[in-house]
Each structure stands twice: as C-alpha cells, then as structure tokens.
Image (cartoon, rainbow, N blue to C red):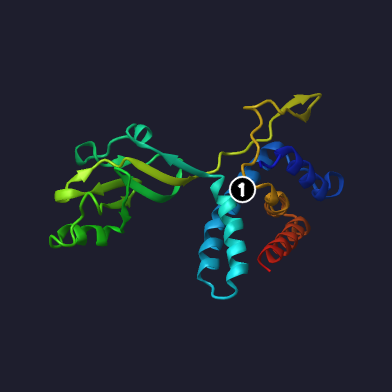
C-alpha cells in the first residue's frame, strides 16, 4: 500500500525540469516530502468530519467515508494492557499516563474492556464533582486528555490506570536515501537509508503536486508553484466531486 519515495522524487524532478527551472536537491525534497505527507494525513480527519456532517445521498457519502476510513486505518494502533502498562506515569499515584509521542488522535480509551467517555477538562471536573448518579463508575469510566497526559476515573472517583488505547499515530518521517558518486546523488533503496511514504497509494499524485508547490516557493519560481497548485486543486476537486 505504500507509495515509493523514489517514484515521487523522479516525477517531481521531471515536472520541475532540471535544465530549465531549477534542481531540487535530495535534502530539499525530503523536507518537502515530509510536509506534504503530514498535510495529506491531517486532511483526512477534516474531510471525514466534513462529509459526516453534510446531508445528502447516504450512499455517496458512505462511499466517501469508507474511502477515508480505509486511508486512516493504515495508521490505527491498538494498545492493550501489556503495552499501556509501559506508559510513563504522570502523577495520580502512577495512574495518570503520558501518551506516547506517536499519538495523533485518540479514538477509544478502555478500562477493563469498558469504553471510557472522553471529556474536556471542564466537563471532566464537573462530572467528578457531581452527585452519586452522575459520578463515574467502573461501568461508566471517564477520561480527560490534557497536555499529552491522560487521566481515567472510575468507582469512588478514584484515578485508575487505562488498560486499552486505540489511536491514530503520526506517519513515520520519509527519506529519499542516496549515495554520492562522482558528485552526483544516486538513489539508495537500502532499508533505513530510504523510508517510503506510508500513505495510501492513491495519494501518489497529490504528493507530487504538493511537493512541487513547496519547491516552487522555496526556489522563488512562481511557474513551478502554480503548476503544483493547479494540479493539486484539480486532484482535490476530482476526489470530492
């Protein structure tokens, strides 16, 4: 499912036209590539939120939702009790935990296989201070996430340690690996040196257009920037039509 970083780089160079418009170095490409991957990844969640809110043909929007879910699921991670037990403690007698740096968005928190209700700080504190009928229990635990720290409360308003977490992780940074031969950068596919895009293969064209746009800005070449923008906008319109 991954997108080959060398394929994208060669397409970007072909569009940029080394002889006439300027050369994009591997270092520059890697910077632009990571920015492009992150933008596309983050857009998934905005699009999913948008399409689930818009009324209309249920079949059409269901198809769009399914497609977005498929792309997001590439980055979905499920941690059980053995994994969450290794999270760094952050107060609350060790019950509060520091979320791993790879977490982008939390989808589900569990305490003893029970789904916890995720509340903002205000609601979390109000529920804890409420009467016996509204306070959290083992059957209705609540969770608050603030500053990367996750707090879980169950019976008797006691802080407890989460036992399960499902989240979307941040994409792994990409890298076009290379070796220099006769002062020329040659592609090196060795794992570790080269790290491919993790995005769905359908994103290959959009990656090319976004990187072109960034390259045009960096090189102060309006023609390259506009070429990338136009192609990117056309791609987005096609996907959403």
Residue sitting at x 61%, y 56%: 67
Q: Residue 43, percent across and down? A: 57, 57
Image quadrant occupied by the N terminus: top right
Q: Is residue 143 left or right of residue 239?
A: left
Q: Is residue 17 left or right of residue 136?
A: right
Residue 90 in view of the camera: yes
> Residue at the right extreme?
19
Q: Nearer the viewer, residue 148 or 202?
A: 202
**Rendered view: 124 above or below 11:** below
- Label 1 environment density (alpha carbons within 10 Å; few <14, some 14–19, many ≥20): many
Q: Residue 113, percent across and down? A: 32, 44
Q: Residue 76, percent across and down? A: 50, 45
Residue 228 position by quadrant: bottom right
Residue sitting at x 23%, y 43%: 160
Q: Which residue bears the numbered disc 1?
A: 37
Q: Is residue 20 left or right of residue 174?
A: right
Check disc 1 and report its element: helix, strand or loop. helix
Residue 125 position by quadrant: bottom left
**Rendered view: 66 above or below 200:** below
Q: Nearer the viewer, residue 212 or 1?
A: 1
> Residue at the top extreme?
181
Q: Nearer the viewer, residue 216 or 143?
A: 143
Residue sitting at x 21%, y 55%: 136
Image quadrant occupied by the C terminus: bottom right
**Rendered view: 177 above or below 24:** above
Residue 101 in view of the camera: no
């Amino acid at each position: 499912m991954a997108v080959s970083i060398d394929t994208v780089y060669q397409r970007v160079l072909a569009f940029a036209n080394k002889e006439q418009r300027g050369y994009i170095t591997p270092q520059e490409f890697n910077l632009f590539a990571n920015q492009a991957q992150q933008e596309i990844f983050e857009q998934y969640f905005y699009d999913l939120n948008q399409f689930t809110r818009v009324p209309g043909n249920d079949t059409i929007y269901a198809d769009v939702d399914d497609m977005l879910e498929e792309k997001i699921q590439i980055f979905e991670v499920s941690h059980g009790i053995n994994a969450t037990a290794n999270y760094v403690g952050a107060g609350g007698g060790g019950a509060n935990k520091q979320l791993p740096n790879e977490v982008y968005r939390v989808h589900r928190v569990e305490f003893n296989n029970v789904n916890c209700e995720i509340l903002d700080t205000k609601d979390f504190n109000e529920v804890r201070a409420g009467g016996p009928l509204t306070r959290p229990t083992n059957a209705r635990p609540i969770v608050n996430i603030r500053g990367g720290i996750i707090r879980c409360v169950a019976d008797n308003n006691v802080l407890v340690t989460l036992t399960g977490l499902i989240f979307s992780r941040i994409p792994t940074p990409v890298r076009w690996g290379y070796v220099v031969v006769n002062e020329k950068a040659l592609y090196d596919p060795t794992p570790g040196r080269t790290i491919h895009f993790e995005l769905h293969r359908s994103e290959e064209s959009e990656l090319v257009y976004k990187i072109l746009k960034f390259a045009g800005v960096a090189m102060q070449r309006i023609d390259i920037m506009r070429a990338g923008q136009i192609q990117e906008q056309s791609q987005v319109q096609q996907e959403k039509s």
